[in-house]
Amino acid sequence: MHEFAAEIAHFAHSIRTGSRPLHTHVEGTEVLGIILAAYASARERVVAPVEHLGAAAVAR
């Protein structure tokens, strides 16, 4: 099975069964902060700081 499809299947299973997903929203927002810093670094050609996004910041 394709990796992304497996991730989606796992997430759907978690929703259906009420079980905890392998990765939580907290871990997801941490990874998003790293990805955004990498894009900023490439765009600005500097070492960009990694922002620690809280769940509230992502929900906006």
Image: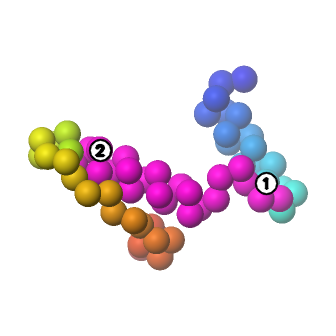
Q: Nearer the viewer, residue 35 or 18?
A: 35
Is any atom of residue 15 visible in this view?
no
Q: Which mark is residue 38?
A: 2
Q: Residues within 10 Å of mark 2 (few under 14, many from 20)?
A: some
As shown in the figure, which amino acid type bears the numbered disc 2? Ala
Kindly report the distance in space between the C-alpha atoms of the residues bearing marks 2 and 1: 30 Å
Q: Is residue 26 above or below residue 45?
A: below
Q: Nearer the viewer, residue 29 or 49?
A: 49
Q: Is residue 5 above or below residue 40?
A: above
As shown in the figure, which amino acid type bears the numbered disc 1? Ser
Q: Taken as a whole, is the magenta stretch helix, strand or loop?
A: helix
**Image position of 15 (left or right of 59):** right
Q: Is residue 47 above or below residue 6?
A: below
In magenta, the rendered stretch is 19-40
Q: Is residue 28 magenta?
A: yes
Q: Is residue 32 magenta?
A: yes
**Image position of 18 (left or right of 51):** right
Is any atom of residue 44 visible in this view?
yes
Q: Quadrant of the N terminus?
A: top right
Task: Determine which residue is flagged by label 1.
Answer: 14
Q: Secondary structure at mark 2?
A: helix
**Image position of 5 (left or right of 31):** right
